[in-house]
Amino acid sequence: MANITIDEVAKVGVLANLPLSEDEKKLFADQFSTTIDVINQLNEIDTKGIALTSQVNHLENVTRPDVIDKDRILSQEQALSGAKNVHHGFFVVKQILEKDSE
Amino acid sequence: MNKQIHELSVVELIRGLEDRHFSSVEIVKHYLDRINRYNSELNAFLYVNEDAIKQAEKIDKEIANGNKKPLLGIPLAVKDNFLTVGLPTTASSLVLKGYYPQFESTVTKRLLSAGAIILGKTNMDAWAHGSSTETSQYGPTLNPWNLGHLPGGSSGGSAAAVAAQLVPVAIGSETAGSVRQPAAWCGVTGFKPTYGRVSRYGVIAMASSTDSPGPIARNVEDAALVISAIAGADPYDATSSSKEVEKYHQLLKRKNLKGIKIALVKEYLLPTMRTEVKTLIHNAVKHLESLGAKVEEISLLDPKYAIGVYTVVMRSEVSSNLARFDGIRYGNGREMFGDEAKRRIMLGTYTLSAGYYEAYYKKAVAVRTKIVSEFENTFKEYDAYIGAVSPGPALKLGATKNEPMFGEMQDILVEPSSLAGLTGAGVPCGFVDGLPIGLQITGNQFEETKILDIAHLYQQTTEFNKFPEKYQK
């Protein structure tokens, strides 16, 4: 039986940029253990020397001509149309640098 | 014509339009009236297109001018994870509440240029995470066969809308079972094309290595017609295939199954499965044999391992795909994600994180190789394999509560095919407790024509393709 701790859930929550309440952390810790148990069944299968499959469509190195496709360019107005917070034609984001961290 | 408009297939509607039995405006009004009447109890549609009648008026002029397009004048519904300009797109999540896309998905673009009218956007599990439509942040969709039961998912709104005859055909998307499973639970036809056959451009991503858009229809012929319209290479999706697209609906010609070899997968008759479901699958075997097919029992890897692989692969890809939703450029903040999305994002983050990547992700994609090569060997000898789509009939509302692996368990029998990128049909094969059961007929990559042809003949020669009494009028 896997045993995922509340601390581990809290750490993953930070990595995943998801705000979690204390109740959620506890609930998810229990539920993650259940899920990890299902995944751990894979250890019953011998995979020594087996190649990895990350895609199944047999295509490799798909390229396109390096030309501008105007159909795919959004105008500034379109690009900003869904944003809640804009300033002089820019998206407003949270400040990530402190003033004295130059 | 004796039949009412909502009793006609897409193919019959097209014929009726060509013969001027009715106009596109009449079809659209008929369906809008039905949506108006029934959607409040079913919650299949999240949004209805207010311009639909205007669009139909334009199309009626095109028809009068003798224009010919494959879906000219046909209304259809689209799952809410396809970007549609002018119609809100939320993937049933509050994170995207109020979002209007800036560009059109390739699938809907192709449907529109084929002359179709988008009647509305259908409910789904939020972000397509689930097999119940119960994780929708706009309330669950109910199963038209029994309102106390779930429609399946994630394309549950699309499946319920077709089953209740609120629309003649609908678009869904599969990551592993999300078209075939709700179609099975709602007693309609679902079709999953080969991975890469239909473009993913403009579909809100779940697991990019298995996502496959596909139709939910009244019958196989209609599904084939829609795939013919949406399939094919797309420069905007580098994983789309440039293999030629066939006119699938014109190739459904079999009168028997002589020369066809079908495998019945022993492990897919799960020990926990109800006897009634197993009996229906054995009946399907007998029927396929009576049509001339040779059916043999084969053994494949226990599907419980596909759950393990799928859980890791899907959650890892989900954690990456959903990282972009931060409420800065569009939508709302990450605190709006529901529990299921949070669980999947976090578990994927965990399986990809340093120290766990080798144990979980690498292990899973190695087992994926085994699943793929098993199928490669199977299709050297067999044209298709069959089994149930889902282990049982539609479960009751609330069944997902405290079941963090609910979706995986209901999709256990189709997950292997999705991991290998195969194509497959789901067609009704009988009823248990008054609820429909689906038969999967699954084939090798790019064998759409063969699978549709077998499924079409099966459907034409059986009596299971029914619609719930309550919504007949």
Image: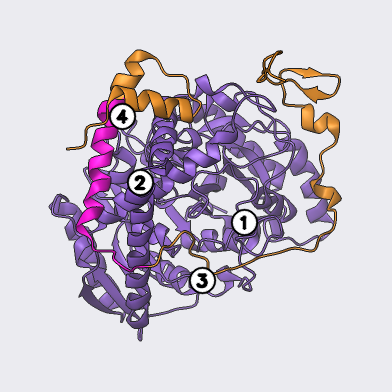
Chain colours: A orange, B purple
Q: Nearer the viewer, mark 1 or mark 2?
A: 2
Q: What's the distance in space between the residues labelled 3 and 4, CA to CA?
A: 36 Å
* Residue in the image at 53% along x and 69% along y: A58
Q: Amino acid at mark 2?
A: Thr
Q: Is residue A30 magenta?
A: yes
Kindly identify which residue carries mark 1: B199
Question: Is residue B104 among what the camera can see?
Answer: yes
Q: Are marks 4 and 1 on the same chain?
A: yes
Q: Are marks 3 and 4 on the same chain?
A: yes
Q: What's the distance in space between the residues labelled 3 and 1, CA to CA?
A: 14 Å
Q: What's the distance in space between the residues labelled 2 and 3, CA to CA?
A: 25 Å
- Residue A45 picture quarter: bottom left
Magenta range is A28-50
Kindly identify which residue carries mark 3: B446
**Neighbour tally class for label 4: few under 14, some 14-19, many 20 plus, Cα within 10 Å:** some
Kindly identify which residue carries mark 2: B311
Q: Earlier in the sequence, mark 3 or mark 4?
A: 4
Contact flag, marks 1 and 2 (Cβ < 8 Å):
no
Kindly identify which residue carries mark 4: B397
Q: Is residue B151 magenta?
A: no
